[in-house]
Amino acid sequence: MVYHLPLSISNRTSSLIRVSHLSFNDLVPPRQTTPTKAIPSEIKIKHLKISVSVELSRPNEILVQFVKQKRFSSRKRFWRLDVTYDQQNINQINRMHQKGKRPTYEIFQSISDDGSIALMALESRDFSNWMSSLPDQVALTSLTIPGSHQSCALYGWPIATCHTRPLSRQLEDGIRFVDIGLALPHGLQGQLIAYNGFQSQLVSFHDILRALITFLDKNPTEVIIINIKQEDRTNGFNEALKREILAIEGEEAFQNRWWLDSALPPSLGQARGKLILLSRGKDTPVMSKGIQFPNWPINSNCIWETQISTTNVAVQDWSNIGSFLSLPKKSSLACVSLCRALHEPLANPPALQENPQTEPSAKTNTQNIEINPAPKPDLKSNNQPETWVINFLSASALALAFPVICAKGFGWSKNGLGLEGVNSVIARWLVSRRESEGGATVSGVVCVMDYYQSPKEALVSLLVDCNFR
């Protein structure tokens, strides 16, 4: 019996992708996306495994084939594969092509709820300086920037832990928006310490600043947005903050290192090598300098808008979702926020469907999301979008919805025995979204994540690649 598998491929590399199975052959040129095609196969989708390889004789061609899985293998809804050569092949390729560069690709597969398959191939990047490949004149608010929520929250599992990697590693991995919660506990002689709620993260603000400055000294083409918020109500917080910042480099270096204007930098070139100071209005007015939000609604379950100087900002920061039953709604809201970053109408957001075997409830009904009308595309200089989007993928709740569960999910979601994590939903959404030629791409958005390396080190790669289309 012959089955037909719906497949689409997005080739984001400079190489050719060849799809070969039975009598079917197709070529996907570099930087092209195919429409969904029905591929004839003797393999049912539930037994399908996709084999990706790069042949030594054709180093600039990626071969995609279908093979049958082992009998008891479980079909994965999302996977990521690195395609590289072993050292012997590298040496032969270098001799053949007189190049010392190692061809490396990242291949992503997403199977959506309707059974359609999407493949995306990316060229691997050095994420420690990914901004170096962008022109100076690009608007900072047009970039797609990966960020980490509660960036220093490594302790207090399962309630207060949001990451397994320290701040220095996050920066090397491509994170460019850091979220720092600080407190001034008694008995520490006024030293600021990183906190997540009531949980100390055992790292001082001095060490945090040192890590940020060291990274920028090593990678002067990069920009880091730092969101500072006070986790306690201790008096003297702002004075301690100013004292510790100035203690690192002094007043003159502080003025040169930090972007202290009340408006966002108009271009990436003006912000390279700098820390962009951001605070939540009245909560943490850091020396009355930097970018301050005039308001920040607490735990709003809708997309809300405000304005920073002349920049319109849309924020999705639904953090306390009540219970794990609200995970599908949180995921849909995060996808809708990416639609806002696409500058598309929000009436029909291309958010992935909830698992059809998961019975909806009043709490998981995504039709109750409150959304303001979408902005129209802006054709101003620097291609600066009309609205800058800050999209928090992070969420938690005491009712079995700890940060790790919200980010990674639990159980076997594809079989209806669990729920898919927000990170996986967003990764599948990014891979599955098919762009027409000349269509909009995700831009002007900061995605702030817990456990950003899940699933399978994919999200940072997929988000950063949005800047190179």
Image: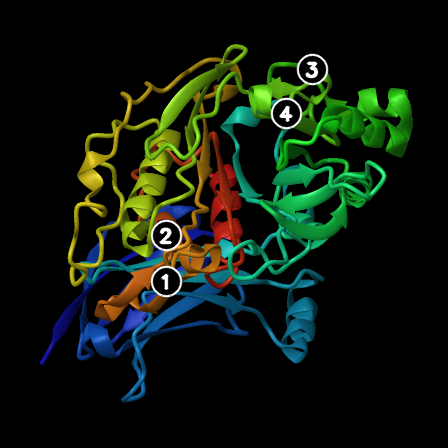
Residue at image mark 2:
431
| Disc 1: CA contacts within 10 A as few (<14), some (14-19) or many (>=20) | many
Residue at image mark 4:
284
Q: Residue visible at 32% across and 31% down?
A: 302
Q: What is the secondary structure assignment of the residue under circle 3?
A: helix
| Identity of the residue furthest to the top in this view | 310
* Amino acid type for the residue under numbered disc 4: Thr
Earlier along the polypeptide chain: callout 3 or callout 1? 1
Query: Can you give x and y, in whole percent of width and height, for residue 414 in the image?
Result: 26, 67
Q: Are marks 4 and 1 in contact (CB under 8 Å)?
A: no
Q: Are marks 2 and 1 in contact (CB under 8 Å)?
A: yes
Q: Residue visible at 18% across and 76% down?
A: 44
Q: Is residue 242 above or below residue 174?
A: above
Q: Are marks 3 and 1 in contact (CB under 8 Å)?
A: no
Q: Are marks 4 and 3 in contact (CB under 8 Å)?
A: no
Give the label on residue 288, or none. Answer: 3
* Real-space Cα separation, disc 4 to disc 2, in angstroms: 37 Å
Question: Which one is in front, 120 or 173?
Answer: 173
Give the label on residue 118, or none. Answer: none
Q: What is the secondary structure assignment of the residue under circle 1?
A: strand
Q: Is residue 138 visible?
A: no
| Identity of the residue furthest to the front in this view | 187
Q: Is residue 79 left or right of residue 178?
A: left
Question: Which one is in front, 8 or 29?
Answer: 8
| Identity of the residue furthest to the left in this view | 1
**Label 3 vs label 1, nearer the camera:** 3
Earlier along the polypeptide chain: callout 3 or callout 2? 3
